[in-house]
Image (spheres, coloured by chain):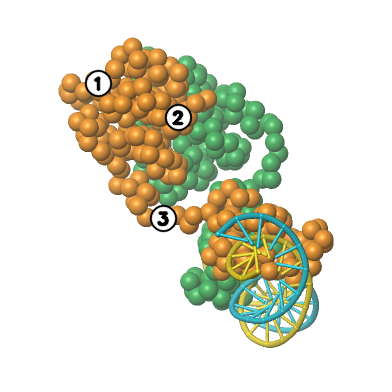
Chain colours: A orange, B green, C cyan, D yellow
Amino acid sequence: MIRVFIVDDHPMVVEGIRALLQDEAQIEMSGSAPDAFAALEAIRGDMPDVVLLDINLPEVSGLELCRRLRQEFPGLHILGMSTFKERSYISRMINEGALGYVLKSASKEEIVNAITLAAAGRAYINEEALQALAAPPQAPTPMLTSREKEVLACIAEGLTNKEIAARLFISPLTVDSHRKNLLAKFGAGNTAALIRLAVEQGLV
Amino acid sequence: MIRVFIVDDHPMVVEGIRALLQDEAQIEMSGSAPDAFAALEAIRGDMPDVVLLDINLPEVSGLELCRRLRQEFPGLHILGMSTFKERSYISRMINEGALGYVLKSASKEEIVNAITLAAAGRAYINEEALQALAAPPQAPTPMLTSREKEVLACIAEGLTNKEIAARLFISPLTVDSHRKNLLAKFGAGNTAALIRLAVEQGLV
DNA sequence: CTAAAAATCCCCTTTTTCGGGGATATCAAA
DNA sequence: TTTGATATCCCCGAAAAAGGGGATTTTTAG
């Protein structure tokens, strides 16, 4: 009998998983918690075999909870869980010691499979999540000088070289140099691609 | 007896709601669908009293589905549903004719309450969602045509008008028209500002 | 059916960006 | 002290975008 504990702040998700697992003979829900504190307390009192851990929790994130759980119970089998959109967290969750990962869009079979494998200490990663992990070595955020950051911010505001020059009290030609350096550092062919990357990487 | 139909692509959410509603005597689930097409078909065949409609659906969005449902069945009671993070959609959902709105973090009581009110044709809005609606007028996301969205995506990729024209099999002049319309709709002075806004609003 | 919206294409001019260079002063670290 | 990084400024020409028109055909919705 595999005992599963769920950490998720959405009652309907908790109930959904409970319902999905209900007619699985070899799986039993040991409990659930809506946040990190309740989860830690409950798990201390009653160790489950597998913890299904949502990444988005109020107050303390799922990542942080994962780290604490691994620290306190090194043998605990943790499965990360989130929607596909939060792909950037997947790798971090794995780094924090999660054994596997399921998406909230997973089918019943997939969840049962993941739990069964996790209980045996074996990894499971959703196919799509794996691709998200494997595919892009993700353009690492280039290192920008402080001046370049200023110029980048101005560009993102929609200013032209001339306007930026006026604001920063430098020559438009200098602004153009910075702009070219930014394009090179980001590997962007034009301003559109540059701004897209910069915004996505939280630099603007 | 209130008959509820759920549209959500996450099995665990569907099962969760089903479980939550199971021991409500006056509420019955008439069915569920994972996407807009299946939903339309099912609802045509068997009209429910209330539709619980997730905003994030694959292919056709919940907004679009809401519009079509209202069009086809003007009397249908629709409740929008999403996570709190997608607040920008709430107002649009209401504009598309949704009667109310619940968050996926809603408690059982809240969901039952919302459904009961909706069945009677009365509005329900989650407290937090209401605040999100009331508070910031926030640069409203402009409404884009499908072609404009395509062009926008291409621009964000760093393609030039000529390259976009080649990809979409249209004249570069047409692409330029779309580009100008995009700039106007976003109130952006140039491509940099346009892409910044688009990325920030999750359109790219 | 008919009006509105979307998508298509075209013209012109000006401004801005891009792609190549190159050059100089400063400052910090090797 | 030399090297490297940063910041500054410059030139040229080609390409692209912006600003401001107008016009036509499909599609869509009332």
Kind of residue indicated by mark 2: Glu
At label 3, counting other C-alpha atoms closer than 10 Å, the crowd grade (few under 14, some 14-19, many 20 or more) is few
Q: Nearer the viewer, mark 2 or mark 1?
A: 2
Residue under label 3: A137
Q: Earlier in the sequence, mark 3 or mark 2?
A: 2
Mark 2: which secondary structure?
helix
Q: Nearer the viewer, mark 1 or mark 3?
A: 3
The chain carrying label 1 is A
Q: Earlier in the sequence, mark 2 or mark 1?
A: 1
Q: Nearer the viewer, residue A182 or B45?
A: A182
Labels 2 & 1 near each other (Cβ < 8 A): no
Labels 1 & 3 near each other (Cβ < 8 A): no
The chain carrying label 3 is A
> Are the residues under badges 2 and 1 in a single subunit?
yes
Residue at 43% x, 32% y is A63
Residue A36 at x, y percent in the picture: 44, 22
Q: Earlier in the sequence, mark 1 or mark 3?
A: 1
Residue at 50% x, 75% y is B166
